[in-house]
Image: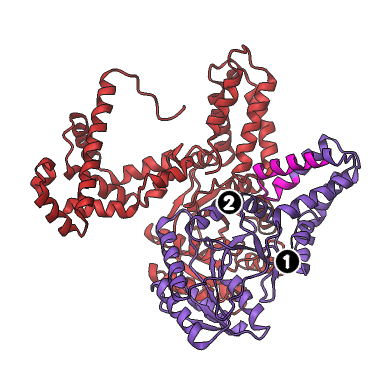
Chain colours: A red, B purple
Amino acid sequence: MLFSGLSEKLQDTFRKLRGKGKLTEKDVDSALREVRLALLEADVSYKVVKQFAASLKEKALGAEVLKSLTPGQQVVKIVHAELVKLMGETQSKISPVDNPPGVVMLVGLQGSGKTTSAAKLARLLKKNGHNPLLVAGDIYRPAAIKQLEVLGKEIAVPVFSLGKEDPVIIITQALKEAGKVGNDYVILDTAGRLHINEELMDELIRIKKKTNPLEILLVVDAMTGQDAVNVAQAFHEQLGLTGVILTKLDGDTRGGAALSVRAVTNCPIKYVGTGEKFEAFEPFYPDRMASRILGMGDVLSLIEKAEAVVDEGKRQILEKKLRSQSLTLEDFLEQLGQIKQMGPLEDLLGMIPGLNRAGKQLKSLSLDEKQLVQAEAIIQSMTREERLHPEIINSSRRRRISLGSGTTVQDVNRLLKQFEQMKKMLKQINALEKGKHKRRGMFPF
Amino acid sequence: MLAQFKKGLLKTREAFKNRFESLFGVNELDEDFFDELEEILVSADVGVKTTEKIIGLLRERIKKERVRERSAARELLKKLLVEMLDDNQQASLAVAPSPPTVYLILGVNGVGKTTAIAKLAYRFSSKGKRVLLAAGDTFRAAAIEQLDEWSGVVGAGIIKHQEGGDPSAVIFDAVNAAVSRGVDLLLCDTAGRLHTKANLLDEMKKIYRVIQKSLGEAPHETLLVVDATTGQNAIAQARLFQEAVPITGLILTKLDGTARGGIVLAVKDITGIPLKLLGVGERKEDLEPFNAAEFVEALLA
């Protein structure tokens, strides 16, 4: 990441002011400048940032910041809260169908991820007990219809297509079909188009008039820059959007487009796409997005992911073991399995504040997925006795383990050494805590 | 040459022009000038850091050349941006001394790799060159069919495997076919991949190695496709792709919308990767070679 966290920058700003006594309006201005830069670096629209900074100033000038002993943190707190407020404080889901079938139209620029999102949404609806129908309305891009058909097959959701017919006719026929079969949601994939292409925008308007959709969702690439406002505004003015799907959030983009789009359309972000798999489709959490835009990492998502795979009972046992320093390779193996379940390592690391900035350094830490697999193989090639008492592993055992796991003796040595170091580290941490060193909070606030 | 790009810009030009006229119309060089310039550059996705750098350099030159008028400052700005984008790096594409020439096309998801390849193929086939396409995106559903349809439209051959196959194997076959069929140009399509996914970058490195091993000098160009609507993340994309394989140039796509593509200034400044081609529309003809002076003119039009 190119940009260090906002909270750190603000702390720097205010550190310079320490000992100055009372903070002035000018001091607040310099803090707001940092906020402004952080938002711009995150691709929030220039205009939106300007408005936001102005509204923020009034709040920041409030007595709480100026009197606070930690004005930097106070400002971050206010900024974060305001961002959350701007992005909609509650989660917003797809509207229920009163009068089936309900049409859900996906619209957006080329390459924003409409077809993939259509399939992901269909899968989610199906999982929740609905009976969706996918409709192939992209008659322009080569093989777009085929793409939807393949995806539909994989998730076992029917796909309606009429080849390169007028999309208005396609959706009309699809609705008839849905009425017969009893589909409740009809998800229409449309061709990618530029918001300034009048002819193609008109096609969407005709579809809207004909079908009176339940939802018109704009699909936006999370990596979009300053143009996000122009795109969102144009689509909203011409179609009256009901919501947004933000895609490709699994990269390292800060995703300021989320804020820009929300600010100009006032439409809620309903879902986010977080990977190439069908399940990588999640509800939108404004508070997490706010942290991400501010470069504070997505701690909450990380915690939730960990909670999803870590059994609470097992966790307590593990914690006990950690404290009593009786950790064995058996436990280590289980940990490796859990880490794997949480998804790609680099995704997890990116969610940890501070770490996402380390960038290159992280790579030298060599937290390679392959190494995890190797470590797993090595431990699996040990007997239970060896896992519980690694000290019995002599050179002939090492040779056997390396052969069994398809690794070298050096690899086995390395793993055992790493495990020893880990135990040592745990010992130190425990000692530190016992020494009543006040543990510093992981988060600045 | 940039007719399409300019046409695309026309629609939003008015708003932009008004701002620029206010910036350059008044001929007094004051702090407002720099504030407005900052807004224009940041709004074009140039990014805060590169914008600050540009303004810093411009201030120096203004001082050095004792410029006191906005109009003269504007000329200095243009010159500065042209220098930043084109430091004698040829925008032209490398061609192998003896065929086949091989280009590898890379990028994150949805930037327009396949379309860019089709346009590139047309550019060469319309000049009588024999072009072969390698359907290296074996991951995305129907990506192979998409390239297959294009191959017919632009008059190029295609080497393809099944969906879900090993992309390196397709590329390997394609390089061999290119040699045995004696084609002039082989264009290798690849699946979209985020620059943050180590396993996908490894797959890409393998593809690169396969080309290198089969044909010493190749790939003659390794082009990263960047969507003009992308914001600051394009810098991270360029950086991490470049760390994985040597990138020789950028293709900036979707310039027919309202996005200005100013991010290439930051990408060039930070990674040194030169811009080589511009995608300016949906037709097979809509690919233009990059020209710094014209690009800057259009960016600030």
**Residue B259 on the magenta segment:** no
Element under label 2? helix
**Residue B51 on the magenta segment:** yes
Which contiguous range is marked in magenta?
B40-62
CA distance separating discs 1 and 2: 32 Å
Name the mark on residue A209.
none
Q: Residues within 10 Å of mark 1 (few under 14, many from 20)?
A: few
- The part of the image, by quadrant, that contains residue B294 is bottom right
The image shows residue B172, relative to residue A293, as above or below, that is: below
Q: For the residue marked with disc 2, what is the amino acid?
A: Ile
Residue extending furthest toward the bottom: B181
| Residue for badge 2 | B235
| Residue for badge 1 | A198
The image shows residue A428, relative to residue B156, as above or below, that is: above
Badge 1 vs badge 2, beta-carbon distance below 8 Å:
no
Query: Which chain does the residue under circle 2 lie in?
Result: B
Q: Position of residue B211 (x, y in %)?
A: 46, 72
Q: Position of residue A26 (x, y in %)?
A: 69, 22
Q: For the residue marked with disc 1, what is the amino acid?
A: Glu
Using the rendered image, report if marks 1 and 2 lie on a common chain.
no
